Image: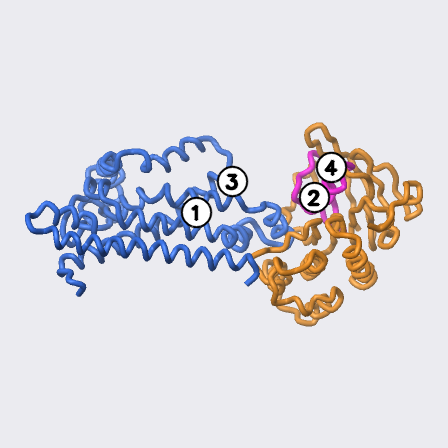
Chain colours: A orange, B blue
Amino acid sequence: MLAVDVEKRLGAFTLAVRFQAAGGVTALFGPSGAGKTTVVNIIAGLLTPDRGSIALDGQALFDAAAGVNVPPHRRRVGYVFQEGRLFPHLSVRQNLDYGRRMSGHPRDEREFARVAALLDIGHLLNRRPRKLSAGERQRIAIGRALLMQPRLLLLDEPLAALDAARKREILPYLVRLRDEARVPMVYVSHSAAELRRIGENIVRLEAGRVAACGGIELLDETETDALG
Amino acid sequence: MFGLSPADWAAVLLSLRVATVATAFALPCGIAVAWLLARKDFWGRVALDGLVHLPLVLPPVVTGYLLLISFGRAGPIGAFLDRYFGIVFSFRWTGAALSCGVMGFPLMVRPIRLALESIDRRIEDAAATLGAGRFLVFLTVTLPLALPGVIGGAVMCFARALGEFGATITFVSNIPGETQTLSAAIYTLMQIPGGDAAAARLVVVAVVLALAALIASEWFARRAGLRFQGE
C-alpha cells in the first residue's frame, strides 16, 4: 500500500497530488507536463517534496512534519526509467546483479533464472548495453529493477522511447510482469491505449493536480490514441 | 648499460621514483579536487580552482620558492610535519616528489574534472534507486565511467613530474643521488666542459621515457574506452 500526499514547487510549476495505490498496477495518466515523472521521482527519493508525506506499507519514506526522508538507496523502490539508464561499463549480467550486490543479498540463482525467463533475456547476459537493441535494453532495465526485490516498482513511460514494433514486443512482458511478479507497480504513461492493456487503477493527473481516480473507464473520457 | 654511468642511472631511477611517488600521492587528491570542482558549489570554489592552477602559470622558480618557505624545515608546514610526523622535505628526494606533484597537479585535475562533468548524472540516480549509497555510487559508477580521464590525468602528471626542473631545483637543490633528477643531471652535465656526450645520452633517455608514457596512456585510455563500446 502506497500513500502519497505531497507538494513540490519547481519554478512556475506547482505539483500537489494526493492518492493511494493498493496492490496491482496503478497508472499515472495524463498529458506531458502534468507532473507524472515528478511524482515517481519523488516516490523514488530522487526529488524531495516541499511538504507532505509518502508511506509505503505503513513505513514513512518521507514525512516533512516529522523530518523523515529515507534516502533513495534505502527505499527498496525499483525504478524503470524511460531511457533504461543501464550501466554502460558493465555487462548485462552485472547490470542485472547490481542491485543485489549493493544491498549485500546472497546470490539467488533461481530468482535470477526466473526473471531472466520472464523477460526472455537469458541469451543476452554476456553482452554490453551498447550492443543491445532498444527493446532488449528496456527488458534488461525491467529485470534489473525486479532483481533488487523491490517493495514497489516504478515504471516511467517504459515504452515511450521505443517504436511501434518494439512497443508491441515489450508490452506482453509487462502484462506478464503484472500477472506473475506480485510487485505493486506505479506505471506512468500518456497513452490510453497502452494503459488499457496494463492498467488496473488509474490516477489522472492534469497540471500538477489529481483530476480523477478510478478504474480504466477513466481512459474512455480521453481521446483514444493508437498504440504506437 | 646503454653507455650510462652509475651516476646517470641514479638520476634516471630517481626521476622515475620521484614521478611515481608524486603521481601516486597526487591521484587521490586530484580525484577529490576534480570532484569538488565538477560537482559542488561552495564558498571558495573559485579560490580553490585558482590555487590548483597556480603552478601552471607561475614561474616554476616562484613555485619552488613558495614550497621552500612553507615546506622547508623553517617553514610553518615543514616544521609541523618534521616535529609531529618526522617527515622532512627539504633537500630530500621526498621534497622533489612534493614539488613534482604540485607542478603536475593542475594537469591531472583538468582531465579528471572534464570526465566527471561529462558523466550522465541520471545513471548515478539509477544506481541510487538500486540500493547504492553515495560512496558506492561513486566507486561503482562515477569512477569507472571517469576512468579514461583519470588515466589521462595520471599520465599527464607523471610526465610533468618526470621533466620537472625549476621548482624542484629551487626547493631541494641539486644533490646527486638524493635530489638530482634526470633534468637536473642533464643541466649539470651541460655545465661541465666535455659533459655534452653524457648529457646527450640522458636526453635520449628522457625522450624514450616521455614517449613510453604517452604510448602507455593511449593504450590504457583506449582499453578503458573500449569497455563502454561493448568489447
Q: Secondary structure at mark 4?
A: strand
Q: Earlier in the sequence, mark 1 or mark 3?
A: 1
Residue projecting furthest to the top: A12
Q: Which amino acid type is shown beneath numbered disc 3?
A: Arg
Within 10 Å of disc 1 (Cα), the crowding (few <14, some 14-19, many 20+) is many
| Residues at marks 2 and 3, CA–CA distance in whole angstroms | 21 Å
Give the residue type that dot 2 points to: Asn
Q: Which residue is mark 2?
A: A41
Kindly identify which residue carries mark 4: A52
Q: Are marks 2 and 3 on the same chain?
A: no
Is A55 in the magenta?
Answer: yes
Q: Is residue B57 left or right of residue A147?
A: left
- In the rendered structure, does residue B71 fall within the stretch colored magenta? no
Q: Nearer the viewer, residue A103 or A144?
A: A144
- The verdict on a common chain for dots 1 and 3 is yes
Residue at the disc numbered 1: B31
Q: Where, by quadrant of the figure, is residue A30 drawn?
A: top right
Q: Say what amino acid the circle numbered 4 marks.
A: Gly
Indicate the secondary structure of the residue bearing disc 3.
Answer: helix
* Secondary element type, mark 2: helix
Q: Is residue B40 left or right of residue A17?
A: left
The residues colored magenta run A33-62
Residue B196 appears in the figure: yes
Residue tagged 3: B39
